[in-house]
Amino acid sequence: MKKRNFLSTLGLLALSLTAMPSWADNYQNTIKAFAKAEESGKIAETAYGYAVFPTIGKGGIGIGGAYGKGRVYEQGKYIGNTSMTQVSVGFQLGGQGFSQIIYFEDAAALKTFTKGEFEFGAEASAVAITAGAGAKATTTGSSAQISGDRSHAKSVGAYKHGMAIFTLPHGGLMYEATISGQKFNYKKK
């Protein structure tokens, strides 16, 4: 019986170790996808830091919500964890999953984000990275329609108040894709 428990424990340990790299890879794959895109890639080269969310789920009918967990990096070094919540009211229908990255232009912008609780106001907008032969890179407003996949991404964008925000779709269909009202919590690693 002891041998069976030992083998079960050893099997669970091996299984957990194989699952861990895929979690870390999820962050690295998301970072690489944004770095490969045209404009977000240019910003990635010079950004002081960034917060990356491999998956944010969003959905609603009239009243909606979104949630995602992420990591914060300063000059390429993982410094803490963040979570994003959003509640929205108004015309919206459907659900979607997407990745999001927030690039910080300098230490001051990163410090603003990592003070504890941070929220994007109504003036905030994200650039939705699009892909595919017929994709349009004109999604610079406060709401955006998005399509495509990670391997053929194109985008446009720039810093605003020291931050540049980009999203990349996973799938789903949602009429509304605004980021205003997103609230972030930060915990140092």
Image (cartoon, rainbow, N blue to C red):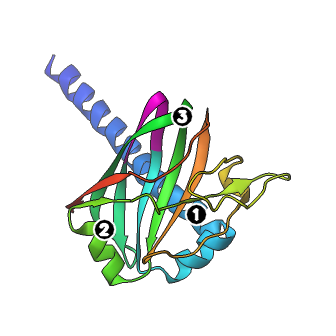
Quadrant housing residue 162: bottom left
The secondary structure type at the circle numbered 1 is helix
Residue on which the image places disc 1: 34
Residue on which the image places disc 2: 113
In the rendering, at what x and y percent does residue 43 appear?
56, 77
Label whose residue precedes the other's in the sequence (2 or 1)? 1
- Residue pictured at 28% horizontal, 73% vertical: 112
Query: Which amino acid, mark 1?
Result: Phe
The secondary structure type at the circle numbered 3 is strand
- 111 is within the stretch colored magenta: no
What segment is highlighted magenta in the picture? Answer: 56-68
Residue 183 relative to residue 156: left or right = left
Residue on which the image places disc 3: 91
CA–CA distance between discs 3 and 1? 29 Å
Q: Nearer the viewer, mark 3 or mark 2?
A: 3
Query: Which amino acid, mark 2?
Result: Phe
In the rendering, at what x and y percent does residue 126 appear?
54, 60
- 66 is within the stretch colored magenta: yes
Mark 3–mark 2 CB contact (< 8 Å): no
Dominant secondary-structure state across the stretch colored magenta: strand
Position of 141 relative to 115 (above/below): above
Q: Residues within 10 Å of mark 1 (few under 14, many from 20)?
A: many
- Residue pictured at 32% horizontal, 52% vertical: 183
CA–CA distance between discs 2 and 1? 20 Å
- Residue pictured at 46% horizontal, 71% vertical: 103
Residue farthest toward the right in the current orientation of the protein:
133
Label whose residue precedes the other's in the sequence (3 or 1)? 1
CA–CA distance between discs 3 and 2? 29 Å
Residue farthest toward the left in the current orientation of the protein:
2
Q: Residues within 10 Å of mark 2 (few under 14, many from 20)?
A: many
